Image (cartoon, rainbow, N blue to C red):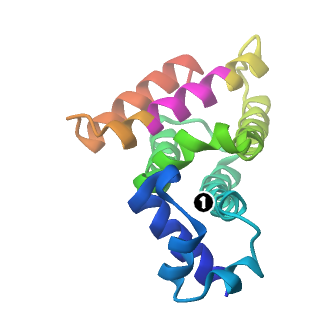
Amino acid sequence: MVARILDAGRTVLIKHGYDGTTTNLIAKSAGISPGSLYQYFPNKDVIIAAIVDDYTDQIARTVTTHLVEHVGKPAELGTMRQMLAVLLDAMSEQPELLRAMIEHTPRLGLGNKIVDFEQRVGELALAHLQLRDQRPEHPNTVVWIAIRAVEHLAIRYVLDQPPIDHGEFLDELTALFGRYVSL
């Protein structure tokens, strides 16, 4: 039942946006009564928070799995491009949900999920840098800036849909990231 409510909530959120989403619409989309919905969730913000949690957890698992597989391996642009492609593809799977999350996460006070994700990726990136023969002088600073730059550019690419080919975007993002962390 919870999965059904969350699926319906995701659909309603994407279709109507945060302001147009109501528990009544979610219940209707789930094919249940509002009273049944309230047995599981007290309000729409809790439903949306659970949707955002699920979405960010999926992206974090995908990216973290890829990063873990490459920690300690030689840093190559091809490997970096693959990692960035994994992130971009994960974000691109549900662009409408990404838009809703970016626009409404601050309002709901859900920023901790994003911070937790950035922290996990940062720790893995830092571990990777520590295993390299040549390390940047300020690895914590490099990792912090790199993660946020990549994150912002990937989000903007998915949401803005600029007239830039996917492969070209990945090539340029990889080059930018590679030059910055001295791959």
State yes or no: residue 25 in magenta: no
Quick check: can you spot residue 72? no
Q: Position of residue 143 (x, y in %)?
A: 69, 26
The N terminus - image quarter:
bottom right
Q: Position of residue 72 (x, y in %)?
A: 72, 43
Residue 146 higher or lower than 105, as above or below: above
- Percent x, y of residue 15: 39, 61
* Residue beneath disc 1: 55
Point 68% across, 53% down: residue? 64
Q: Main secondary structure of the magenta part?
A: helix
Residue 147: say if magenta. Answer: yes
- Region of the chain picked out in magenta, as a range: 145-155
The one nearer the camera, 97 or 43, is 43
Residue occupying the point 68% across, 80% down:
37
- Label 1 sits on what residue type? Tyr
Q: Secondary structure at mark 1?
A: helix
In the picture, the quarter occupied by the C terminus is top right
In this rendering, position of residue 133 left or right of residue 157: right
**Quadrant of residue 164 within the rendered picture:** top left
Q: Is residue 101 placed above or below 157 in the rendered structure?
A: below
**Relative vertical location of residue 72 with respect to residue 25 in this rendering, above or below:** above
Residue drawn 71% across and 53% down? Answer: 68
Residue 132: image quadrant is: top right
Q: How many marks?
A: 1
Residue shown at the point (51%, 26%) measured from the top left: 177
Would residue 127 be found to the left or right of residue 65 on screen?
right
In this rendering, the answer to whether 29 lies above or below 140 is below
Res. 37 in view: yes
Q: Nearer the viewer, residue 76 or 100?
A: 100
Counting other residues with Cα less than 10 Å from the Cα at mark 1, is it few (<14), some (14-19), or many (20 or more)?
Answer: some
